[in-house]
Image: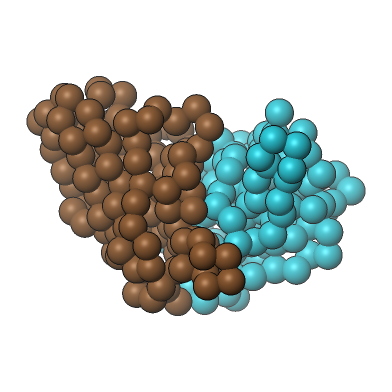
Amino acid sequence: EVQLVQSGAEVKKPGESLKISCKGSGYNFARYWIGWVRQMPGKGLEWMGIIYPADSDTRYSPSFQGLVTISADKSINTAYLQWSSLKASDTAMYYCARLGYCSGVSCYSGYRFWFDPWGQGTLVTVSS
Amino acid sequence: DIVMTQSPDSLAVSLGERATINCKSSQSVLYSSDNKNYLAWYQHKPGQPPKVLIYWASTRESGVPDRFNGGGSGTDFTLTISSLQAEDVAVYYCQQYYSAPQTFGQGTKLEIK
């Protein structure tokens, strides 16, 4: 079974740094793009960026470029989302999700696919 | 960036009735090389991660009830729930995966009337 398991909830103060994780299992982690999606309280889903773990090719939304860093360690099947200096406005649920799909015995990777499956989400609260 | 606009923002439908959600993209998400629309629909319930319902604009994900149907092409798309069930209460999002950033619509909240 393809599964993404995210790290637990975090409570941080403004200005602190943070790195949350997303561990994949049940598939060749390096060969499928992984993305991050933000949901601020009471708001919709926002596409933050994606990474290809095999070579760390990364694409960011202009809205998040320079504000977060997406990385991956293919040796431990884990993707990361990190902040160097958190703000209260970073308070949100963050989801990771895989791109690509399998139909029968054929599997397709690439970034021009929908998100499936998703991790369970990591709630980040930033408050003084 | 491709802007995705859903309508309505919220919708209340009686049990057993039809629900229709619209999604419009600011540019075509139909790729001429494969004649596929790079458009997905997700269902998002409180306390759960989003779940893909439809991809390629009209292909139902395995296990999704056949009351969920996607249609449209180019820039205009619809998600139709033919006979609303109580468990369909959720927020629904369209997403284009034609080009990065692979933007979502703002969401449509579906409730029971």
Q: Is residue B9 above or below residue A10?
A: below
Residue at 18% from the left image edge and 35% from the top image edge: B18
Left/right placement of residue A71 relative to residue A121 reads right
Left/right placement of residue B17 relative to residue A25 reads left
Report the chain shown in cyan.
Answer: A
Report the chain shown in brown.
Answer: B
For the rendered model, the colour scheme is: by chain
Q: Position of residue B45 (x, y in %)?
A: 37, 34
Give A57 or A8, whichever is nearer the viewer.
A57
Quarter of image, res B112: top left
Q: Is residue A1 above or below residue B53?
A: above
| Residue A69 in sight here | yes
Residue at 24% from the left image edge and 33% from the top image edge: B82
Give B104 or A14, whichever is nearer the viewer.
B104
Q: Is residue A43 above or below residue B64?
A: below
| Residue A10 in sight here | no
Q: Position of residue A71 (x, y in %)?
A: 73, 60
Q: Quadrant of the N terminus of chain A?
A: top right
Q: Position of residue A123 (x, y in %)?
A: 51, 42
Residue at 56% from the left image edge and 36% from the top image edge: A120
Give A109 or A37, whichever is nearer the viewer.
A109
Q: How many marks?
A: 0
